[in-house]
Image (tube, rainbow, N blue to C red):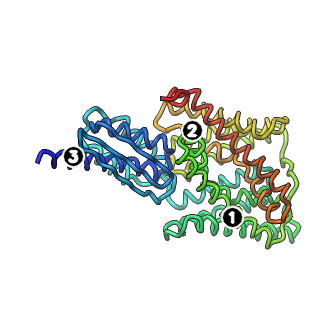
Amino acid sequence: MEDDRVTQSLVRRSAAVLRLGSLLLGAGAGSYRVKDSMRRAAEALDLHEHRAQVTLTEITTTARDGDHVRTEVIEQRDVGVNADRIDAIAGVVERLGPRTDVAALESALDDVERAPRHYGPVASVLAVALACAAFAFLNNGGPIVCSAVLLAAGLGQTVRRRLQHARLNKFAVTALAAAVSSTLYVGVVLGLESLDFADTSHEAGLVSAVLYLVPGFPLVTAVLDFVRMDLSAGLTRLAYVTVTLLSAGMSVWAVSWLAGLELDGPASAVLDGPLLLVMRVVASAVAAAGFAMLFNSSPKAVAVAALIGGIANPARIYLVESGVAPQAASLVAACVVGLLAALAASRGRPSRVTLSVPAVVIMVPGVMVYRSLVHLNEGEVSAALANGVEASFVIMGIGVGLAVSRMLTDRNWAFER
């Protein structure tokens, strides 16, 4: 009888810890955060030992209580982002004390799981539309391009939400949403162009219209997993990011090919002087805030992410225009983002990752990726490799910058423990 009670207690406590990890994984948290949170919860529930192996979609755990051992595996198919849930679970873990009752943890997780999203469908669509339009401006798009992107991204996000609720395959959702956004953008711009009432900066708008499909959270957490030497988690996340980008990129290329669009040369800014700087700050802040809302960050986190993006991204653009290599400029800007996020996280509830990812998503070199795909499909391998390698180095620069900032502010990341 005593063994039965111990076993039942172990089963319940192990299940609670695994549920916490599953909720975190489904919210987009990185492998290190999932493992560390589960370890702390296991210690609070007085489990003698707890081991976990985490990938993008699976968690395998082994819990021990005395001579009793339990191994469990759970699959988390909902690969998404919920920044507020990540922060809420972080708060739950912080409040756990020694010998916490398992019922208290289960109740806290129930509250987290039942918490509604901060923003409804209309607010989410509007946030995406404004963020993508701001990104188009940052890529030197004119008023017509930004307006077309606003409409295209809004419709694409609407379609994406409906397809996600229908539980369609994730990569099919990405491809279809990208096709909708790029088709509407091309239709609007070419229609106005035929009336001699549009600028011709196609790339700035075409890429900006699908920026909301860039998997920024998995991209950043993949890099952080690699830094922590968690290669299995990092590789699975990187594979997911790559296939997602290919799904969106091929749809955009197909639409541009059918429409007969040609590659643009580098576009020049539509403004200059102090006004351009002010508009870049505003556009960067709007874009970061929009993506923070898409990730379901709290209103406070949205405001902080907007402030960080408004500081770091214009500085990155200035460095590039001053002749600094894009990857070096991205590294410096991402490091600044990470340091500012660490400072803000030390003074409030939002975590670093929920503050830093929205600010760095707008630094992703979408135009380079698009050019690489176009050149590759046209058989121009050298040009495709040149753009692809440059885009890869910029993305690596973003990841390295965030990792450096993390190591500068967290001893657990700077030293092996």
User: Residue 186: percent from the left, percent from the top?
Assistant: 77, 68
| Residue found 32% across the figure and 45% down from its top | 108
Write down the residue under mark 3: 9
User: Residue 74: percent from the left, percent from the top?
Assistant: 39, 55
Q: What amino acid type should be assigned to the residue bearing mark 3? A: Ser
Q: CA distance from mark 3 to mark 2?
A: 42 Å
N-term mark: 3 or 2: 3
| Residue found 61% across the figure and 48% down from its top | 219
In the structure shown, which secondary structural element does the residue marked by tag 1 occupy? helix
Would residue 24 be seen by someone viewing this image from the given angle?
yes
N-term mark: 1 or 2: 1
Write down the residue under mark 1: 152
Compared with 245, 318 (above or below) is above
In the structure shown, which secondary structural element does the residue marked by tag 2 occupy? helix
The disc placed on residue 304 is: 2
The disc placed on residue 227 is: none
Please state which of the two labelled residues, at mark 3 or mark 1, is closer to the viewer.
3
Q: CA distance from mark 3 to mark 1?
A: 53 Å
